[in-house]
Amino acid sequence: MDHFTYVNSQLQAEGVALRRIADEVGTPVFVYSSAAFEGHLRAFDSAFKAKPHLVCYSVKVASNLALLSKVAKLNLGADIVSGGELFRALKAGILAEKVVYSGVGKTASEIKQALAAGILMFNVESEPELSLVSSIAKDQGLKAPVALRVNPDVDPSTHPYLATGLKESKFGVPVAEALSLYLRAKDDPNLSVIGIDCHIGSQLTSLSPFVDTVSRLKVLLGKLRAAGLNIKYLDLGGGLGITYESENAPSPAEYAQKILSGLGDEEVTLIFEPGRAVAGNSAVLVIKVLYDKITPEKRFVITDGAMNDLIRPSLYGSHHAVAPLTQAQAGTDSIKVNVVGPVCESGDFLAKDRLIPPVSAGDYLAVKSAGAYGFSMSSNYNSRPRAAEVLIEGDSYRIIRARETQEDLIHGETL
Ligand code: LLP
């Protein structure tokens, strides 16, 4: 749901006009609505209330401590893919026993850190990783709780970079090989095999790949139980898409209905790792127009926001709506422009051939649906300090990450 709407011609979220934030905090700035973020988390959680379940917010998507502390306050868990994400989740108050840990390249020190913290389960992605987790658990005198991340070979029909459950993918263990690896793990005294995990991709706007996955995993679950394994958790990962442009993204309730009916009366605690569906439409990136540059071929709106702030258009060709903070008067003719940043790459664009109302230097624009994989994928390329992050809560807002300074850019460097 879009919580960013015009009130008296000013784009606002909850009770705060974004113009006020742009003037007071500067740009570029990511502005999150807490009502949107928490509302999406609650909608996801309550969609599954008919069944034992745990929602583990996917930390990589937007990992600011203030957002993670909202997750903690709702008693939800976290999906992590690194020691750094575990550090953040615990700092924000998320309980270790609600943390699941995926990723194809967990290092020994990250595995030790997660074991010592007492996470809920490792989603193990290969045979050598299983051996390493086992030997570290043995050294620490602990039993490691594990699931295998199974690759069900389902086509999620999304951008190729966002598909993770195809046979050629680096992720997970092929479903046909999973049984034998599970049987090895069962006999390992350092492991406690408690779950099945998968994550087939991201930005899925059709529910049928999820349904296919559930039916494949149900077959595996039956085999594992017949072999005497006590599988308590079925982790279905994240992946539910959102509306960026005109996609018809299913709601969490529609998603839940399909999954629950596919699962039938199977007794298992479900785990979900939603990210984009929670954060994506919870934030916009506010940028300022620097120049309106007209060439014989194109018209460029050059802004202070760039690919280092939001890389999704450059990396995936993805669409983000661009809207002025002050609504254009009815009847204003649009102009066709490329919205670009100052970065020295032709791939530096936020929108291409887009119709927007005429703008001039100093005007503010909102790049919408920027909450997921926005700030968390930002970089310092071209020695650009990273943007500030702001959280709106009702009629007030607070800075949840200060804009980086030029001093921050050289932190840890030596002459
Ligand atoms: N669980 C695992 C194991 C994942 O790898 C991911 C995302 C998620 C959960 C969360 O998926 P979501 O609910 O957000 O679809 N940077 C790309 C998306 C990469 C997805 C990475 N994995 C983008 O900007 O579209």
Image (tube, grey):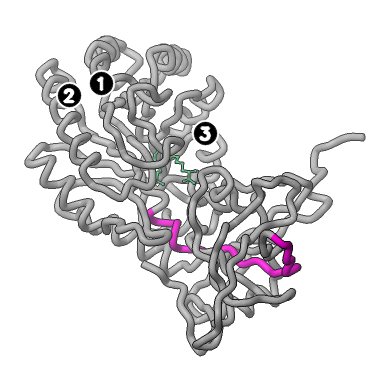
Spatial CA distance of label 3 from label 1 is: 24 Å
Label whose residue precedes the other's in the sequence (2 or 1): 1
Residue 287: in magenta span: yes
Label whose residue precedes the other's in the sequence (3 or 1): 3
- The numbered dot on residue 175 is 1
**Horizontal and vertical percent for residue 375?**
58, 52
Q: Which residues are magenta?
A: 277-296
User: Height in image: 246 above or below 140?
Assistant: below
Q: Nearer the viewer, mark 2 or mark 1?
A: 1
User: Height in image: 275 above or below 285?
Assistant: above
Quarter of the figure with residue 131 = top left
Q: Which residue is mark 3?
A: 82
- The numbered dot on residue 220 is 2
Q: Amino acid at mark 3?
A: Ser
**Horizontal and vertical percent for residue 288?**
69, 69
Q: Could you say whether the residue bearing mark 3 is in a helix, strand or loop?
A: loop
Crowd around label 1: few <14 · some 14–19 · many ≥20 (10 Å)? some
Question: What is the count of numbered marks?
Answer: 3
Q: Nearer the viewer, mark 3 or mark 1?
A: 1
Q: Is the stretch drawn in magenta largely helix, strand or loop?
A: strand
